[in-house]
């Protein structure tokens, strides 16, 4: 088990060593987001902006205009929500900034509903021109950051806080777009965003143990969404489920519903995530289970469908 957020600092340092003109912007959370590791090695390329997220976003745009690749790293709630107006303007300007949202969904469990980023995918997906990446384990963070750095324009990277399994990539390498990481049949298809790798895998394994065979699909790039690949992967599946550490409105579930509606798909869609509600303070794993973001909830929903 490894926490993806623990690799944020290492990924930024690696980019700097590779020659990318990276600067890092923080809002008083460097120890929590692990950017303090970058600060130690490259203090001249690290900017502490304090608890002023709008100003930090504007500063990131200024750094991009100077030719740097600005990584603004903050809790997902703040980097997408608090600074949304400035982010919208950055997207309008096609600014070459990279946003990293740690503690997404209910990952910041004990801090309560105010810190639970259950709308960040919806807030970013609605903005023209932004790319949304959702790496699924600690070993995928560095490559996802380099993928973001190679994209000209705004990118949002969603990085899980919680320790989670590392997927065996000996058969299927890191997914950069959308792909089935496990495939045993066409009874069903489960699509997940990166922060729920553990829960999606658990549900898939429970279904296989019950005699049902399907596909486990990682959506590593939520925007731009590869509808053609999605339809090729799921075209023979009568039952499709999405699982996300996010509200089902506007996130992965919303994206899949839109893609299916566009082609008049006859498959049944089940969306698992929070449902038009705020959450509360508590252990993040227990909270996810309470709100139906678990392998057991996934197994139950598909078994009863």
Image (cartoon, helix red, strand yellow):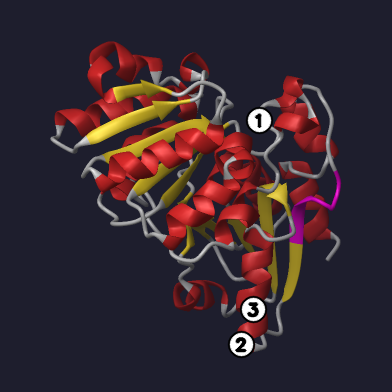
Q: Position of residue 24 (x, y in %)?
A: 34, 29
Give the mark count.
3
Observer-nearest of 272 and 130:
130
Circle 1 Cα neighbour tier, 10 Å, few/some/many (<14 / 14–19 / ≥20): many
Asked if labels 2 and 1 touch by Cβ distance under 8 angstroms, the answer is: no
Residue 260's disc is 3
Q: Which residues are magenta?
A: 271-277
Labelled disc at residue 13? none
Residue 256 position (above or below residue 28): below
Element on which disc 2 rests: helix
Q: Quadrant of the C terminus?
A: bottom right
Q: Is residue 134 magenta?
A: no
Dot 3 and dot 2 residues touching (CB under 8 Å): yes
Can you give x and y, in whole percent of width and height, for residue 106 in the image?
A: 71, 34
Q: Position of residue 284 (x, y in %)?
A: 73, 27
Q: How far is disc 3 from disc 2 in space, using C-alphas? A: 6 Å
**Where is residue 164, by image quadrant?**
top right
Q: Residues within 10 Å of mark 2 (few under 14, many from 20)?
A: few
Front residue of 215/8: it is 8
Whether residue 240 is situated above or below residue 147 in the rendered picture: below
- Comparing labels 1 and 3, the label whose residue is closer to the camera: 1
Residue to which mark 2 is pinned: 263
The residue under label 1 is 107
Q: Earlier in the sequence, mark 1 or mark 3?
A: 1
Q: Is residue 181 visible?
A: no
273 falls in the magenta region = yes
Q: Is residue 152 left or right of residue 209?
A: left
């Amino acid at each position: 088990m490894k926490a993806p957020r623990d690799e944020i600092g290492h990924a930024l340092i690696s980019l700097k060593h590779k020659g990318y003109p990276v600067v890092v912007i923080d809002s008083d959370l460097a120890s929590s987001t692990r950017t303090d590791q970058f600060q130690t090695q490259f203090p001249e390329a690290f900017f502490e902006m304090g608890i002023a997220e709008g100003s930090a976003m504007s500063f990131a745009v200024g750094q991009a205009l100077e030719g740097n690749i600005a990584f603004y790293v903050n809790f997902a709630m703040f980097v997408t929500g608090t600074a949304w107006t400035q982010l919208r303007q950055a997207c309008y300007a096609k600014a070459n900034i990279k946003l990293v949202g740690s503690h997404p969904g209910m990952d910041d469990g004990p801090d309560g509903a105010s810190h639970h980023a259950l709308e960040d995918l919806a807030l970013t997906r609605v903005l023209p021109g932004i790319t949304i990446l959702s790496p699924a384990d600690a070993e995928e963070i560095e490559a996802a950051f380099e993928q973001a750095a190679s994209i000209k324009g705004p990118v949002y990277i969603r990085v899980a806080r919680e320790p989670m399994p590392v997927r065996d990539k000996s058969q299927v390498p890191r997914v950069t777009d959308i792909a089935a990481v496990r495939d045993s049949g066409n009874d069903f298809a489960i699509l997940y965003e990166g922060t729920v790798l553990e829960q999606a895998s658990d549900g898939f394994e429970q279904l296989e143990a019950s005699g049902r065979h399907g596909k486990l699909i990682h959506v590593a790039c939520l925007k731009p969404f590869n509808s053609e690949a999605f339809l090729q992967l799921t075209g023979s599946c009568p039952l499709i489920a999405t699982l996300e550490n996010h509200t089902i409105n506007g996130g992965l579930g919303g994206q899949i519903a839109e893609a299916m509606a566009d082609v008049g798909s006859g498959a049944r869609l089940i969306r698992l995530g929070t449902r038009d509600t705020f959450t509360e303070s508590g252990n993040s794993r227990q909270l996810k289970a309470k709100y139906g973001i678990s392998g057991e909830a996934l197994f139950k929903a598909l078994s009863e469908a």
